[in-house]
């Protein structure tokens, strides 16, 4: 079975001005995940690979920071503090999935600004504060999975 291997060179992707859907799931990719790879990106799936880190969401990438709706980095080997990953999560995100990694620490209070969040999954990680007090502010939340923390 042929699978993509190695790391992703993201720089050329930044020039794909109308790319809205990016899916590299189910390969053998490694290195760092950069979720905001194109200005109009709405859907990013990096699941089922061997990524070991995730670049912080960067607010200066204005367009993709505002357009990203779906992000899946589940089933990788991301070993990083949850605050480093999530503190600047795009405000219009609707689905964020990062289960089955090695993400540790607590969830940042800044998550309470996610008024469109419908699905939030971070099961099977090493989070220390499972249900933060601000969780009631997610009026649109339909799925929450924080199970199996180590």
Image (cartoon, rainbow, N blue to C red):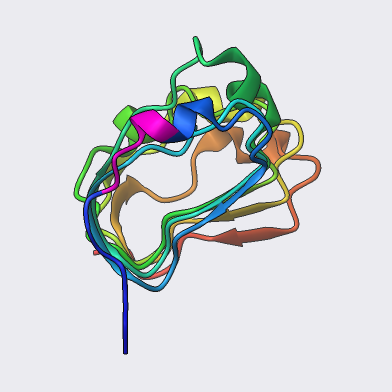
Q: Quadrant of residue 68?
A: top right
Q: Image quarter for residue 30?
A: bottom left
Q: Residue at x 80, y 44 (%)?
A: 140
Work out which quarter of the rendered image holds the N terminus and state it: bottom left
- Image location (x, y in percent) of residue 21: 64, 49
Relative to 114, is 8 on the left or the right? left
Looking at the picture, how far across and down is residue 117, in whole percent? Answer: 70, 42
Which residue extends farthest top?
60
- Residue 29 location (% of width, % of height): 26, 61
Q: Foreground residue, 150 or 49?
A: 49
> Is-magenta flag for residue 11?
yes
Residue, far right = 140
Residue nearest the viewer, comparing 112 with 2: 2
The relative height of residue 16 versus residue 27 in the rendered view (above or below) is above
Q: Magenta segment range?
A: 8-12
Q: Nearer the viewer, residue 25 or 108?
A: 25
Tell me residue 144's x, y (percent): 61, 58
- Residue toward you, 59 or 143: 59
Q: Is residue 23 magenta?
A: no
């Amino acid at each position: 079975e042929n699978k993509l291997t190695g790391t992703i060179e993201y720089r050329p992707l930044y020039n794909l001005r109308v790319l809205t859907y990016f899916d590299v799931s189910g390969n053998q990719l490694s290195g760092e995940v950069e979720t905001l790879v194109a200005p109009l990106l709405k859907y990013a799936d990096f699941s089922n690979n061997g990524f070991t880190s995730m670049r912080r969401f960067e607010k200066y990438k204005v367009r993709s920071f505002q357009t990203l709706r779906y992000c899946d980095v589940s089933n990788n080997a991301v070993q990083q503090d949850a605050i480093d990953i999530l503190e600047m999560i795009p405000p219009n995100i609707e689905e964020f999935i990062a289960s089955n990694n090695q993400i540790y620490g607590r969830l940042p209070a800044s998550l309470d600004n996610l008024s469109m969040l419908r699905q939030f999954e971070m099961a099977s990680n090493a989070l220390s504060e499972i249900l933060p007090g601000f969780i009631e502010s997610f009026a649109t939340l339909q799925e929450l999975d924080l199970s199996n923390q180590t």
